Amino acid sequence: MADLSNSADPTATAELAETPPGRMSWSRLSEHPSLLIGGGIVILMILIAIFAPLLAPHDPYAQDITNRAVPPVWFEAGSWEHVLGTDQLGRDYLSRLIYGARVSLLIGFAAVSIASVIGTTLGLLGGYFGGRVDMVVTFLTTIRLSLPIILVALAVVAVFGGSITIVVVVLGLLKWDRFAVVVRATSSQVSRMEYVQSAKAAGASNFYILTREVLPNLTPQLIVIATIEIASAILMEAALSFLGLGVQPPTPSWGLMISEAKSYMFFSFWLISIPGIALATLVFAINLAGDGLRDLVSPDGRG
Amino acid sequence: MPIYLAKRFGLAVLVAFCVSILAFALLRLQGNAAGALAGEGASAEDLAIIVETYGLDRPLIVQYASWLGDVLRGDFGTSYFFKSPVSDLIFDKIGNTVILAIMSLTIALAISIPLGVLAAVFSGSWIDRLCSLVSLLGQALPSFFLALCLVMLFAIKWRMLPASGADSWRHFILPAATLGYYITPPFMRLVRAGMIDALSNDYVRTARAKGLPAHRVILKHALRNALVPVVGLVTVQLGLLIGGSVVIESIFALDGLGYLAYQAIGYRDFPVLQAVVLLLSVVYVVLTLLSDIVNAWLDPRLRVS
């Protein structure tokens, strides 16, 4: 709730005014190595996810009981046939890892798309109209923040059964708070700017002003929040799947792969460390890119 | 001040009321509560007995009103699975969760305050970059993955610490270390930002001009001011910790509220689940209320608006 009271921060307006929307030259980009490195890894992972069928050496679902828990190639017992080894059911681990990128990215992007629409709409309404509307928006945000998100997600999945769709919808319906808080604060400042006032004076409708004048000026902030939230949604999906209440077997999800390998961790820890490192790398890269984007959007304020 | 407090308190009560509706509705979303409870393959007679026992045939609003009435009297109903009063179960487990939350918070503060100060004092240097790298890594490592790595090293390989249970203080070390590391990044960022802000202030310049040694300026004058917003974050994180420990408590079979909720989910034990969701939400509402009151007390400007 303390977050909500920061709306009177005057520096945000200055930052907004200084940032020319949509202008991002290569030279400016190269000043932000974290954006380059993070963004590069993320784009690579997205490409891997899209072209998974072409890249995966084996069928990620094909079981081979005679070849169970073969270690990766860098172990003595490993072979180039299965570069990252096989899991406890003899499925090729590299292929499952490649297809797992699809699940993580799909859920991350889809859930945050839903959340951004809800949060942005609420934030815009509250920030632009103020008064009673704003009170309702603030109240809804406060309620959402009071709910323990992982527990609520677990409970809903337990009631409806786990699937990619359910996980996307649940996370989408729960993760809009940051969008609402930030959009509300910035849009209330933008609404007081001269060009919005003059659009009002010229007789433009509220809908026109919100979608054409206010929203475009929030795009940089929205992109930054979206990256943070995608990273956090990916981690939550992994945690839900790890607890057995997310993506269901045999779908390859990194969280589920770690969960399935738990009982083999003593002898084959790589079954856990490989998907764990993949998850950490993806989330690290998204956050790194998000940090870089934030520097790009607000050049003088880090943190 | 009294008006602000009354308003703030009224808001908290209203939020808690709405949360109670959500906590109740959450588990009735599917509609068929008796079927969900009986599990697959239950006979029509079984279902009828369940509906009868729990009064599931009454209108939802009546069920809600009677549930809320009971809750306000401290009666959270009887657990479907454990067959004992939910309030007893919660009373038994809450201690472990609170110990875990406080230990994690202590670890997080012990890491983040020194690192945050160092990062701010040497802002832009390799120390600053190293700290932000540590903080980014902390956000990226899935907590359950970190937990399994710690179990592998400290419990299986070196046999130094137990991997599951809550029998002694040693059982809390691995879970608290995992959770503590997990919540360190936001504290570190806040301390760093607060210190950079404080160090650029006039009173710090004055203290420096007086010829005070650097460590006194940093620790006594700047840090004290930088820590004010940290108090607010502590209350919020404490709320999140109590809720967020579901995953960690389940991994370490640490017998607290999170583990209880996880078991309740598995057994479709609605009264327990409703009670835990409601309780954790109310704890969060109370903590944010306290933090707002403390803030209003510290900062007179807030009382006016």
Image (spheres, coloured by chain):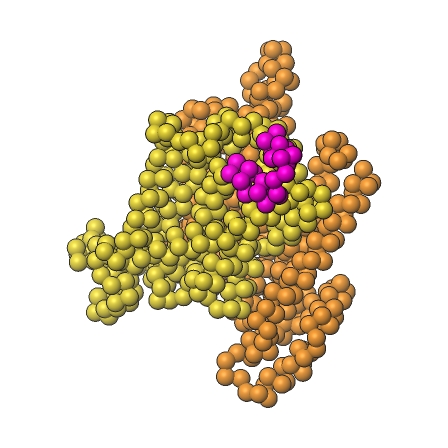
Magenta segment, principal secondary structure? helix
Taking the view exactly as shown, the residue that stands out farthest to the right is B2
Would residue A25 be found to the left or right of residue B181 on screen? Answer: left
| Viewer can see residue A26 | yes
**Quarter of the view holding residue A4:** top right
Residue B275 % position (x, y): 65, 63
Asked if B29 appears above or below A130 in the picture, the reply is: below
Q: Nearer the viewer, residue A134 or A165?
A: A134
Q: Nearer the viewer, residue B224 or A48?
A: A48
Asked if B62 appears above or below A120 in the picture, the reply is: below
Chain coloured yellow in this rendering:
A
**Quarter of the view holding residue A82:** bottom left
Chain coloured orange in this rendering:
B
Residue B245 % position (x, y): 54, 54
User: Measuring 74% from the left and 49% from the top, which residue is drawn there?
Assistant: B11
Residue A59 % position (x, y): 24, 63
**Quarter of the view holding residue A198:** top right
Residue A6 % position (x, y): 64, 36
Q: Nearer the viewer, residue B213 or B298?
A: B298
Taking the view exactly as shown, the residue that stands out farthest to the front is A202
Please give the range of residues in magenta. A194-217
Magenta-colored stretch includes residue B84: no
User: Measuring 43% from the left and 51% from the top, which residue is drawn there?
Assistant: A109
